[in-house]
Image (cartoon, rainbow, N blue to C red):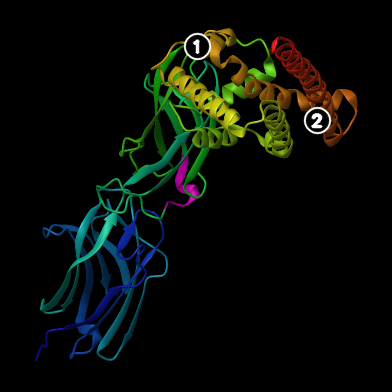
Amino acid sequence: MNVVPVNGAYIITDFTDSDNLYAQLKDYTATASVTDANTYPDITTVDLTVKTGAGATIGTIRYTEDTDTFSIFTGTQLFELGTGSAAVRAGNTIDVTYKFRVKWGTGSEGCTLELTTTDASGAYDTDSTTNYLDVITRLITYDFAVNATNCVPSYPLHFSGKIHYANTATGDSPSASYPSDPEFTGMAIVDDEYITTVTGTVSSGAFAVNGTAKASGRVTQYRIYIDMADADYADDYAPDGDTVTVTTTGAWGLTWPPLQQILDDIFSHFTGLVGIVTAIQSVITAFSAWFLQSVAAIISLIYWVMMAVIYASSSVIFWLGQFVPAVINVFTIIGAMIDGSGAIVTGLGDLWGYFGFSQWLTIIPIFGIWYWVAGLAWRVKRSGRGTIDVIVGDLQVVAWIVGEVWGWVYLVFNAVVNLVFTLISYFKP
């Protein structure tokens, strides 16, 4: 008498990110145990099937007992056999281990996993687990960034970002997983005129490439083109539509190369910032390693300059009341110039005009400090002296100048005061 075969436990043992199967990430493993009271040779096939949430078959991996072989019975466009599939047959039981890989096809989420065991008479047992897994074949980009969103023409650009699997079949949220490096042929940064700006490689799901801004003033949008090694992946722009925009404006027209480089780096990171703390943070971010090594020197010089002004004015409130609003105003004006809401800068001289005469003396220390730092390395190299030696020498000169100026101011002040009191005494009845 024929007995209908019976399915036992069946699972996928090595999901990625909880319940996902990612295309070409690795060989996944599923196990199933089935029995037949008529002994295992009565079993003809053991099918593991993935279906959409609506019940349409995506693919079936079949084990055929008679030949002890595995095959992709349906869905060869999405599944392929991995390495290591095997079946252990004994008595009434067959324990099946399926090794399979997802290809670059059409993904689906909320899928059903189904196990069907059929015997020689055509009798079968079918079990299914709904909403069991997601098949992900979608790649998206995120953290796409460029070092300068506002810059001068032909400015060096650095693009960076990541290419990961989406965490759903059709969504744009990234997962923590990404294809292995050999899966990528590469990637490209393409502008809105469909011109490839730069190409590069993808390593551990990330890329970093260098390009150049447009040679003329314009607004340019850049996006990512993904090029995969497998022919079953349709190479195209990243489906999430992630972009960055770079605005190039006319040249600054500065005549001091060191200061031009510093100001270009600063301005390229300012987009209308108005807070002095935020401005300083952006300045520090924009500067290269040599500037960071000079932070101590800058702080010392700022300290001496501030002390000199405080000493001369005899009032901390006077300094803060004059210097801080001026700094905020300067960075506000510069930010407006950069983001296009303010005047267009055609030269360094224009900056002084835009700041206003009343702020000139308050603003001078800002540019003086930047230019002093810019020339420090060159002076050290030319003089053959050490950096600290040059800095200390500069501070001594500043201290001497401040002392001399204060001495003359004090002398004149005393002379005026004495003259006033002498005149008062003379004319006093």
Q: Which residue lies furthest to the front in this view?
A: 429
Camera sees residue 159: no
Q: Earlier in the sequence, mark 1 or mark 2?
A: 1
Q: Residue at x 26, y 72 (%)?
A: 64
Q: Is residue 349 visible?
A: yes
Question: Which residue is more in the foreground, 386 or 139?
Answer: 386
Q: Which residue is drawn at 35% across and 53% down?
A: 23
- Front residue (pair 149, 156): 149
| Residue designated by label 2 | 395
The percent coordinates of residue 255 (x first, y second) are 66, 10
Relative to the observer, which residue lies in front, 225 or 185?
Answer: 225
Q: Where is residue 401 in the image (x, y as percent from the top left)?
A: 81, 22
Task: Report the label total.
Answer: 2
Drawn side of residue 311 relative to residue 4, left or right = right
What residue range appears in magenta? 178-185
Quarter of image, res 271: top left
User: Is 27 colored magenta in this rendering?
Assistant: no
Tell me: 374 left or right of 331.
right
Horizontal side of residue 372 vs 156, given as left or right: right
Q: Is 230 placed above or below 417 here?
A: below
Q: Quadrant of the N terminus?
A: bottom left
Residue 362 placement (x, y as % from top left): 60, 20
* Category of crowding for the residue at label 2, using alpha-carbon neighbours closer than 10 angstroms: few (below 14), some (14–19), many (at least 20): some
Q: Mark 1 falls on what kind of element? A: helix
| Disc ID at residue 354 | 1
Asked if 411 appears above or below 3 in the picture, the reply is above
Type of amino acid under label 2: Leu
Q: Where is residue 356 shown, x and y percent of the image?
A: 52, 12
